[in-house]
Image (cartoon, grey):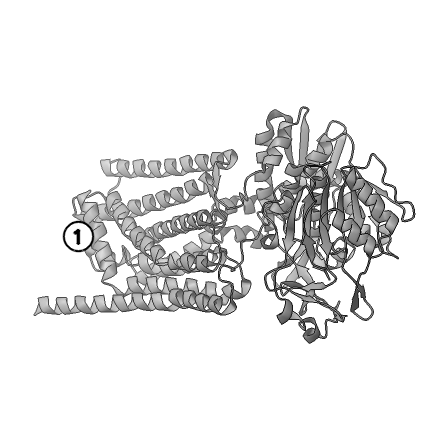
Amino acid sequence: MDRVRGSTPVSRTHRVQWGVTLLVIAVCAVVLANAELLGIAADLTPEERFSLSDATYALLDDIDDPLEIRYYVSDRLREISDEPQRKEALLRRYSDAGGADVRVEVVSAAGEGAREAEEAGLRAEQIQQENGDSIGVSTVYSGLTVSYLDRTRTIPFLFGHSQLEYQLSNAIYDVLRAARPRLAVMLGTHGEELDVDYAELVDELSDRFQLVELSGEQPEIPPDIDAVLLLGARDLTGAQSQELRRYFDGGGRALLAVDGLRIDLSTFEGEPVENEALDVLLASVGFRVEPYAVMDERSNPISDGTAPGGPPYPPWIRTDSRNASPDHPVTRFSAGIDFFWPSPLRIDGFDNGRGGPLLVTTPGAWLQGEPMRFRPDEPSVLYRDRDASVGSYALAGWSEDAAGEGSRAIVVGDSDFASNLVFYTGSFQNYMFVERSILWLLGEDRMAAVHTRSRLPGALDRIEPEFPRLLTSRIVESLNAVVLPVMLLLVGYLRLRRRRKIDQGERA
Amino acid sequence: MTGAYAIVRRDLFALANSAIGWVVAALSLALSSGAFFWVNAFLARDVASLDAYFATWPALLAFLIPALTMRVFAEERSNGMDEMIGVLPISTGRVVVAKFASLGIYLFFVMVMTVPVPLGVSLLGELSPSLVFVQYVALLLLGLTMVSVGLFVSSRCASQLLAYVLTTLVLFGLSFLDSLPLMLGLGAQWVEATRLISLDARYGRLSQGLLDVADIVFFAAMVAIFLRAATHAIHARRYVTHG
């Protein structure tokens, strides 16, 4: 065996081969870098998770003057997750779609950048991270500002990539408008106060809309109001009901959060709401709220306050994209909402219009009538009426008087869904539902349907009765995890045995 | 090409006549399905999605592919077959590509055997065919890349055991490369740079349903580089032996 040294043809061949290898690496690196920048990709997700919505493209087309997006992000976030990279990729799509008018700048939120972020109104968040045996805490920024002419909107903190398009497109929508839309807020339950019981909602909406609270005694809706929110209607007065009907007759648009029951939280006992003014109002927009509580197994757990989680609590229903109507702008990309002791709705729609459900329960939901008892420590009572009433129930719906004045209504069978309870259960998607609803009421259908990327895959609901579903599942599991592998081993064994016999025959 | 075709046929025949080929295929199916249906509580989660199923494959392949690739060159080297390859009237590059192709075909066969999983799940809930297609493409690209890494390591080792251990280590290293700068306390730039060449990060992006040219180029480049390196190693040895 000779080792070949020196400048022989062989060593030259080796050098050429190494050169080719390095060239391949270099070419691949360049192609990789450019492919990253160009973002050449096919989005094959069913909900087009990685593509911008039509509404965003239309919005960016409307921009006539330079619009600047500044994304502030801490290096620490880059180290622990690829979220910042994914956000930057999405921001690049904005800049590509917006052309020269849209400028995106990524700012490292360290030192001067952190000071700038603070001044812009960004919120620092603390994140915990394991470092071996200890847990460290870091303060990080991940927010952005959108500036257009003399108007600036700040998104103080972006938690996930999934809602970036929704938040950013809405921020752009807001800065493109010279004036904020005016919303009138009417309360219809005794003892509730807007700044107390709905403080979180007010905080959420007041950046984008001018809120005008209507007095209970003289609930006159000013003519320059763009939409109305009715929050709670257990004690809706005749005057309030009449004013809202007058408003609808003139083409009014309102979100009505109403209840079919009243709960005493000291005893967890409930009673049906009997309010004719409410019934008449709902009938005028093609709805009826039934005097029952709806319960569903897909529910939020009720916590005892000492630890998160707990046993499921059927009167607190968690809906998600699987319970949402895919045909309506408000719920097309909705993450669903959380309901607290909701009531079922009957939806007929306006006399000359149309309407339908927005959010429904699972088919396994049930009702509870009188006596209504909701104590979490008495689960047998919660399931009491299940067998007699199991089915799917509408919890939120829409109606539109397309033939008349263009009135629009969204009715939710629960007023707590927008109350401060949301803060305690972390159901912040409820506020997004309110925002989308307002946009639809304002006639901004496309904006109401801007993407969020948190749409869940479908449920295993193709086979509905429990037993055949379970049986099919067991067959699929066993076939794939046991039968097929065992069959492969068997075929392999038989083949090897046959081969061995042939070999033995040949040897003989 | 006839020579390369002969090697593909010979290797496939050898796989079909060896216990390891059947055992690896059966283990792949049993472990991936078992983890998906039972460990991840498929029915209880009530979600018509194969995300969890495809998420189990990178770790699984990192253990199983070395069992296939360890024997390719290391075995031939230990039993002297490499000398026979050395005198074949075919270039070293073609030999390596032929061996890669035979393992690629085998991998494709294993993936075809997993098709009853999406078919079964689609009986219970609505799956997105386009998403499942991308997830299979991602799995195939990941598998082929791992095979090319395994072939390279096998080409450098005389012992099958050493080839298996080294390949597994290299595959885990390449898969979770982006965790290293974090553990060492290096900066964000290092994390992002290593994420660009992490097999797991690339596979994760693809299997979410975004068929990105960058990811496809990455996997193709990895295959090209490792096959090239394997060719170089074999060629050098071949020349040393017969020079």
The front one of B68 and A255 is: A255
Tell me the residue at 41%/35% (across/down).
A27
Q: Is mark 1 on a helix, strand or loop?
A: helix
- Residue B126 lies, with reference to residue A91, above or below; the image says below
The front one of B119 and A359 is: A359
Residue B18, percent across and down?
25, 63
- Residue A76 lies, with reference to residue A505, above or below; the image says above
Q: Please identify the quarter of the rendering in which residue A64 is found.
A: top right
* Residue at the outermost front position: A351
Residue A91, percent across and down?
60, 37
Tell me the residue at 54%/62% (across/down).
B46
The front one of B201 and B91 is: B201
* Residue at the outermost left position: A508
Horizontal placement of B174 versus B236: left or right? right
Tally of numbered discs: 1
Residue A32, percent across and down?
46, 38
**Residue A266: in sight, yes or no?**
yes
Mark 1 Cα shell of 10 Å, populated few (<14), some (14-19), many (≥20): few
Tell me the residue at 54%/45% (across/down).
A47
**Residue A3: in sight, yes or no?**
no
Task: Say which chain tag 1 marks.
Answer: B
Horizontal placement of B230 versus A380: left or right? left
Which kind of residue does numbered mark 1 sit on?
A: Met
The residue at which mark 1 appears reads as B84
Q: Please identify the quarter of the rendering in which residue A155 is found.
A: top right
The quadrant the C terminus of chain A occupies is: bottom left
Q: Please identify the quarter of the rendering in which residue A495 is found.
A: bottom left
Residue B215, percent across and down?
45, 43
Horizontal placement of A76 versus A425: left or right? left
